[in-house]
Each structure stands twice: as C-alpha cells, then as structure tokens.
Amino acid sequence: MKKIITSPSAPAPIGPYNHAVLSGNTLYVSGQVGKKASGEMMTQDIRTETTQVMENIKSILEEAGMTFGHIVKTTIFMKDMNEFSKMNETYGSFFNGDYPARETVQVSRLPLDVNVEISVIAVK
C-alpha cells in the first residue's frame, strides 16, 4: 500500500509527481527547491535557498507525522559546488547530530533554475 502525502505549506509540484509517498513505514520525499507555497522564489543566496528547501521538507515530514530525526537518506543536487560549505552548514543546522546518509552532486541545471534541490527518505 502507498499513501500520497501533500503539505499545504510546501509549494505545489510543477509536474506529475507528489510531495511524498508513504509506503509502509518509509516516506519518499520528492526533491524540494527554494520556493515558498505562495510561489515566491527564495534564491537570493544559497543559505536562504537551502533554508527554504529544508522548511519545505519539514512541512512534508510533519504531514506524515515525522521529523528530521526520521530521515535516513538525503540526496542533494547543487548547481555550484563552490557554495557547498554554506549549503552544508545551513542543511546541518536542521539536524541534532543524528545525520542521515547522503550524497551531494553538482549538476548543470535544476528545475526553475534554482541552485539547490534536496530529496529525502525517512523511516518511522
């Protein structure tokens, strides 16, 4: 069985996908970008953008009854790896030291021409 998870506090998907899918105790959260639910893009700088991405993930996790502590795997796509340390510091501030497994890769382009996109897998 799978259950679709949608958060009114996260921006609407821009394609044929959902915010997240819950399968058993595992939540698969689609890649989130620095866009508010209102549609406002928060791409002024990488810290602001990463914060908005993580806030979107937080709202989706909450809809599923989870927190950042439930995340077991993160995938981060960045447009410019030179911004890694700023993104990494901001990303890390959302966790309490119990960090998930992760990879970070640089890509040539992301949806909506954002600078960072993050997807997560969480287990309850």
Image: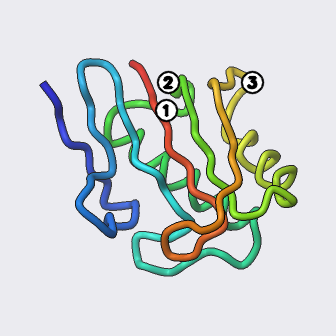
Which type of secondary structure does the marked residue at label 2 adopt?
helix
Which type of secondary structure does the marked residue at label 3 adopt?
loop
**Type of amino acid under label 3:** Gly
Left-right relation of 6 to 37 = left
Residue 12: x %, y % from top left:
32, 67
Left-right relation of 36 to 42 = left
Residue 74: x %, y % from top left:
57, 35
Tell me if label 2 and label 1 are in contact, CB under 8 Å: yes
Q: Is residue 93 above or below residue 87?
A: above
Residue 64: x %, y % from top left:
32, 35
Frontmost residue, 121 versus 113: 113
> In the figure, residue 16 lies in which quadrant?
bottom left
Please tell me how crowded label 2 is: few (under 14), some (14-19), or many (20+) other residues with Cα within 10 Å.
Answer: some
Frontmost residue, 87 versus 51: 87
Q: Residue at x 55, y 78 (%)?
A: 41
Which residue carries the number 1 mark? Answer: 67
Which type of secondary structure does the marked residue at label 1 adopt?
loop
**Type of amino acid under label 2:** His
Which residue carries the number 2 mark? Answer: 70
Please tell me how crowded label 3 is: few (under 14), some (14-19), or many (20+) other residues with Cα within 10 Å.
Answer: few
Q: Residue at x 71, y 67 (%)?
A: 48
Which residue carries the number 3 mark? Answer: 97
Where's the C terminus, which quadrant? top left
Q: Residue at x 26, y 55 (%)?
A: 17
**Type of amino acid under label 1:** Thr
What colour scheme has been applied to the protein in the rendered image? rainbow
Please tell me how crowded label 1 is: few (under 14), some (14-19), or many (20+) other residues with Cα within 10 Å.
Answer: some
